[in-house]
Amino acid sequence: MRKEEFLNELKSKLVGLPKEDIDYRLSFYEEMIDDRLDEGISEEQAVAEIGSEDDIVTEIAKETPLATLVKEKVKPKRTLKDWEIILIIVGFPLWFPVALFASFIVLLAYFLIWIFVIVAYSVEFSLIASSIAGSISFLGGLFSGEFLLTNLGAAMLSGGLAIFLFFGCYFITKATLKLSNKILTSIKAAFIKKGSK
């Protein structure tokens, strides 16, 4: 692929960004290609070394705040006509509850993912507390003359399960953070590519 073709395709995939950001990104990648051309690499090879447009859009999405993308998306591209304004006002009782409900469902799904993590940590802390309470009960029994072996066994079992569950909690938290980051990056990439097709 030639430099101009690459830059034109990249520009068409970045339409969700503000104009200044698009210009900055295009000049950045044009300079990268020019630097490689100065090193004696062919134009096609220089473009290939940079990577695909989709990979570039994903990287840009990771570093661009969602608020910037939403602001650019809702910014009017033209003035609304009178009949469009009337249609928006008259349709408000229909479209607003639907939009609110859809937003609520998306947020609920996101919170449900994190509730699973919170429950796992709650069980972890309960097992730790149970282990500590069983140990204290066993030691208290020794001083009072009672030998409560079941309390020691329960304390050791709870402690062992707490250690085992700690690694599960760590894995679940790491996986949930990774999933959340991937979802957010996908949403931002969709905003950036909104008019590329």
Image: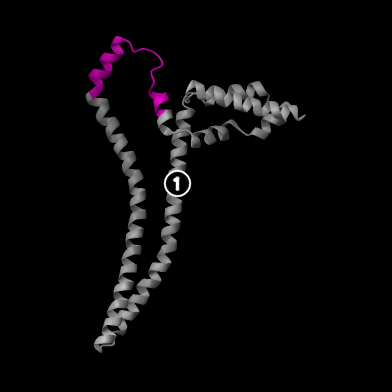
Residue 171 horizontal/vertical position (percent): 45, 57
Residue ranking furthest to the front: 143
Question: Is residue 77 depicted above or below 60 in this figure?
Answer: above
Q: Which residue is mark 1?
A: 179
Q: Residues within 10 Å of mark 1 (few under 14, many from 20)?
A: few
Residue 36, picture quadrant: top right
Question: Is residue 171 depicted above or below 177 in this figure?
Answer: below
Residue 29 horizontal/vertical position (percent): 62, 28
Residue 37 counted in the magenta span? no
Whether residue 58 sits left or right of residue 141 in the image: it is right
- Residue at 55%, 22% in the rendered image: 23
- Residue at 32%, 60% in the rendered image: 122
Question: Is residue 126 depicted above or below 171 in this figure?
Answer: below
- Residue at 29%, 87% in the rendered image: 147
The amino acid beneath tag 1 is Leu
Provide the residue span drawn in magenta. Answer: 70-92
Residue 81, picture quadrant: top left
Could you tell me if residue 197 is visible in this image?
A: no
